[in-house]
Amino acid sequence: MLTARQKELVKATVPVLREHGVALISHFYKRMLTGNPELQNVFNNAHQARGHQQQALAGAVLAYAENIENPTVLLNAVKHIATKHCTIGIRAEQYGIVGKHLLASIKEVLGEAANDELIEAWAAAYGQLADILIGVEGGIYKEQTLADGGWSGWRPFVVERKVQETENVTSFYLKPADKGTVSAYKPGQFVSVRVYLPELGIMQPRQYSLSRASLQNDGLRISVKRIDTACDKPAGLVSNHLHARVNVGDVIDVSAPTGEFYLKEGNNPVLLVSAGIGITPILAMLQDIAAKNPQRPVKVLHVARTADDFALKKEVREAVAKLEKGECAVYLTRATETKEMCPCFKLSRPDAAAVAALEPAAESDVYICGPVSFMDDMRETFVAAGVPAANVHSEAFGTGNQS
């Protein structure tokens, strides 16, 4: 339990964290990954290189310091962080390593300003936060392990099938190497996949949505977009590795399905909105409704560059056809014509009028997945159209885009 004096000292560092938080956390990560190189197998190397991880943690540390007197206001953020931690196998004993390097970094970066009293205050604050996260993560691990066909941490899966969906999207059908069953998951959830990258000499995890509904418990499917070099952005190491080097019969490590972005049960109208590879969790939701509640009103809005870039379109069409009240509009942003022209294709970008055409109601639930800017724009547009903000749900993969 923090004393009033310790809370006061932690709050006093807020201005410093606002100005120098990213520099402090960058120093921390460099220190920790040098002192404990085994943790390079845990953290996303691409997020580290691009600064995403540093910015995300700096923001979280600042928010914790700002709310040190009432950290319960951060419970949603804590649950989100804990969920991500569980997908990459973070364990309770590793918090001691993180704490050691974080406190040392505060002392090294702040210099004389970091006296013993301040370090003790931050040690107490970090201990409190670590205990909260360990408790939440322990609950998630327990729930995953006790589920039929469940597990926690990494489990080896065999690639049973590899299907090229588009020029840059490939689906991987995965079955447990132990030949056991797989726990049911909620439509929209994701797994982490871990592979060894020879060019880095380390294991690397990435998160991918499960691209089909959990209608049987014999396996999983992920559909991975290959991230190519574009402008100043490097190619995605893991996505390219999966596309080029992982084949049928190969074994990869997979975490238990999890995630806070999933379809809520009910009979109210559902609007499923996606762009590009964002179709993957949306398809799982669509298939789930088609199989379990086909009377539920569903409208789909998807954005692709061309018809050929519309991944999993056959399955989308099949699922919509099973719905009693299903509609689908697909916006092709880089096509002037298409040989697959059908009533659902529109050669334009979706705008406020496109959203209005979906006739969103106050009781609708909206699920959005795609690039961050797309999700932000769609969220604002749906709220402006009358859908309560609490009913608009969007996916956010950790600290940045998949690679």
Image (spheres, rainbow, N blue to C red):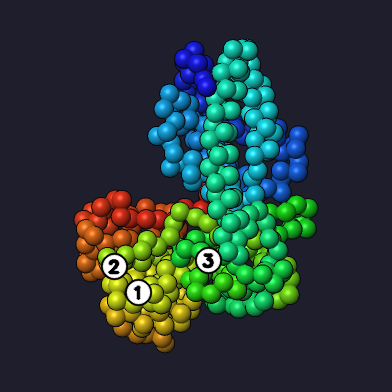
Q: How far apart are marks 3 and 2 (CA)?
A: 21 Å
Is 309 placed above or below 318 here? above
Q: Please tell me whether residue 50 is drawn above or below residue 116 in the rendered image.
A: below
Residue 227 in view here: no
Q: Are marks 2 and 1 in contact (CB under 8 Å)?
A: yes
Instruction: Give neighbour class at mark 3: few <14, some 14-19, many 20+ (Cα, 10 Å).
Output: many
Q: Residue 122 carries which label?
A: none
Sequence-earlier tag: 1 or 3: 3
Q: Residue at x 72, y 54 (%)?
A: 203
The residue that mark 1 highlights is 293
Point 43% across, 74% down: residue: 287
Badge 3 marks a residue whose secondary structure is loop
Of residues 11 and 94, the one nearer the viewer is: 94
Q: How far is the residue under mark 1 from the one under mark 3?
A: 17 Å
Residue 134 in sight in this render: yes
Question: Is label 1 in a helix, a strand or a loop?
Answer: loop
Read off the residue under disc 3. Answer: 184
Which residue position holds label 2?
A: 267
The residue at 53%/56% (across/down) is 258
Q: Position of residue 313 (x, y in %)?
A: 45, 78
